[in-house]
Image (cartoon, coloured by chain):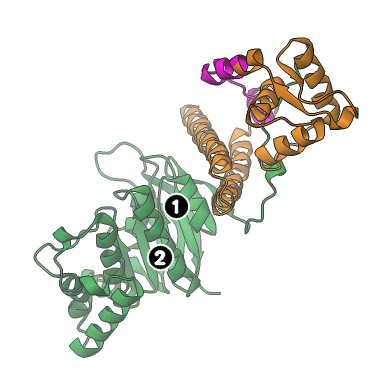
Chain colours: A green, B orange
């Protein structure tokens, strides 16, 4: 396995905001992993994601993604790097309401300059894979939250990113739709897609991620690799039964 | 949970002998507890003495004697089911005591203790989710709810260790 994301002693502070949002964070993410970043609100999860995405720059330390030191890239090259190498899924889908599903999915390919025919073929293939091909000509407003998030996943994957970044992708969905979206993301990971998932939902994280990194107050508090589960009930749950003594 | 009301609840469905009570109880709990047959016998005897159950057939082989609920027994289980539980919160896991002692004894490397505990809870959460799903796929929605309860407790435990870690860190920063 190769290291896809490499954070070395990364810190981040904002002018005016007291203290550091991230403090001395070092973290490697291997190719093919599904890693969940967890932590209470304000712990620095989204800042970490923004630094890896090159949306924000660190105050100290180094962020390398796919071998590129992001600090050395000009804004223009960084923007191109993001389009070509990274896919984003957000909590609130962020689809463009005046474009159809297919046009939304195609947009990052157009921005990257991919030729229309292969881009279209890939978009249709993704929509089929995500089970929403019949919605290609619909506008987002007519779709359910779960369907919109599937479109967002397709859009994130159109340029075959090395890394899929998902920031609370189920946060705006009901339990069932959220579960379906996570099954989808986990399925993509099984096929080799590297995923970085930010969530505050521990059940979701442990169920779908192989690794859980926990941030507390801007520092890595814990980094756990979970074992595949074949649990025995008696080792996990015990209903307390008392013998009545009377 | 009281074995007494567990037995009354099972007998409310149908008359059972002691071994059947044991087997059903274990099945009810999804194999998470082995019930002691001796305890079942003595509890059944007490319930008979108190008029809550009675032999369903003439007394023969002791192990094979089926018991059924009396009217008093049925009222007792109905009353018990309707009452909310208001026992003190049980903090049974040793981590609570460890937390209190570590701050005093171990020169307070609380952060490492909490991180290790967090790992256990994360793995437990993953394992419990598998059990919940398994129970559901086997048509045991009642057992799935029991596991769901355990999952929610574990989520609360996780939040608690994080709150402790946060408090510990804030304390360190102040020093």
Viewer-nearest residue: B146 or A230: B146
| Vertical order, A122 against A163 (above or below) | below
The reply to whether residue B148 is in sight is yes
Res. B88 visible in picture: no
Dot 2: chain letter: A
Q: Around disc 2, counting alpha carbons within 10 Å, would you say few (fewer than 14), some (14 to 19), or many (20 or more)?
A: some
Q: Residue at x 61, y 33 (%)?
A: B110
| Image position, residue B137 (x, y; %) | 55, 54
Q: Main secondary structure of the magenta part?
A: helix
- Foreground residue, B89 or A8? B89
Q: Residue furthest left?
A: A98
Residue receiving disc 1? A37
Name above or below for residue A146 compared with residue B1: below
Tell me which residue sits at (40%, 49%) in the image.
A199
Query: Residue A246 at x, y = what percent?
Result: 77, 10
Q: Which residue bears the numbered disc 2?
A: A184
The residue drawn where x is 56% and y is 19% is B78
> Considering only vertical position in the picture, is B23 above or below B61?
below
Residue lying furthest right: B61
Boundaries of the magenta span: B75-103
């Amino acid at each position: 396995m190769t290291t896809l994301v490499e954070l070395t002693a990364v810190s981040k502070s904002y002018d005016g905001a007291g203290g550091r949002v991230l403090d001395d964070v070092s973290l490697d993410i291997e190719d093919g992993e599904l890693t969940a970043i967890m932590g209470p609100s304000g712990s620095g999860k989204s800042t970490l994601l923004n630094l890896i995405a090159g949306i924000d720059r660190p105050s100290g330390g180094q962020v390398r993604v796919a071998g590129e030191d992001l600090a050395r890239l000009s804004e223009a090259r960084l923007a191109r790097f993001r389009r070509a190498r990274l896919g984003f899924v957000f909590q609130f889908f962020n689809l463009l309401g005046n474009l159809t599903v297919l046009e939304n999915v195609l947009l990052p390919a157009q921005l990257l300059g991919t030729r229309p025919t292969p881009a279209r073929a890939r978009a249709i293939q993704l929509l089929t894979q995500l089970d929403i091909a019949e919605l290609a000509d619909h506008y987002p407003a007519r779709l359910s939250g779960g369907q919109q998030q599937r479109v967002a996943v397709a859009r994130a994957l159109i340029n075959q990113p090395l890394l899929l970044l998902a920031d609370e992708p189920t946060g705006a969905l009901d339990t069932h739709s959220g579960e379906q979206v996570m099954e989808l993301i986990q399925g993509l990971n099984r096929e080799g897609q590297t995923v970085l998932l930010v969530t505050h939902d521990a059940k979701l994280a442990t169920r779908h991620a192989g690794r859980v990194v926990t941030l507390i107050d801007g520092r890595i508090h814990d980094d756990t690799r979970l074992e595949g589960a074949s649990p025995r009930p008696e080792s996990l749950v015990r209903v307390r039964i008392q013998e009545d003594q009377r | 949970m009281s074995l007494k009301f567990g037995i009354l609840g099972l007998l409310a469905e149908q008359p059972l002998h002691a071994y059947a009570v044991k087997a059903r109880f274990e099945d009810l709990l999804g194999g998470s507890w082995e019930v002691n047959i001796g305890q079942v016998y003595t509890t059944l005897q007490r319930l008979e003495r108190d008029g809550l159950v009675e032999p369903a057939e003439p007394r023969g082989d002791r192990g094979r004697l089926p018991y059924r609920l009396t009217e008093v027994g049925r009222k007792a289980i109905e009353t018990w089911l309707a009452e909310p539980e208001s026992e003190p919160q049980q903090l049974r896991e040793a981590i609570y005591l460890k937390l209190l002692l570590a701050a005093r004894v171990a020169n307070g490397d609380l952060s490492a203790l909490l991180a290790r505990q967090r790992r256990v809870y994360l793995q437990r959460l993953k394992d419990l989710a598998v059990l919940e799903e398994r129970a559901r796929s086997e048509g045991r929605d009642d057992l799935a709810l029991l596991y769901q309860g355990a999952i929610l407790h574990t989520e609360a435990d996780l939040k608690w260790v994080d709150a402790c870690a946060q408090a510990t860190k804030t304390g360190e920063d102040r020093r």
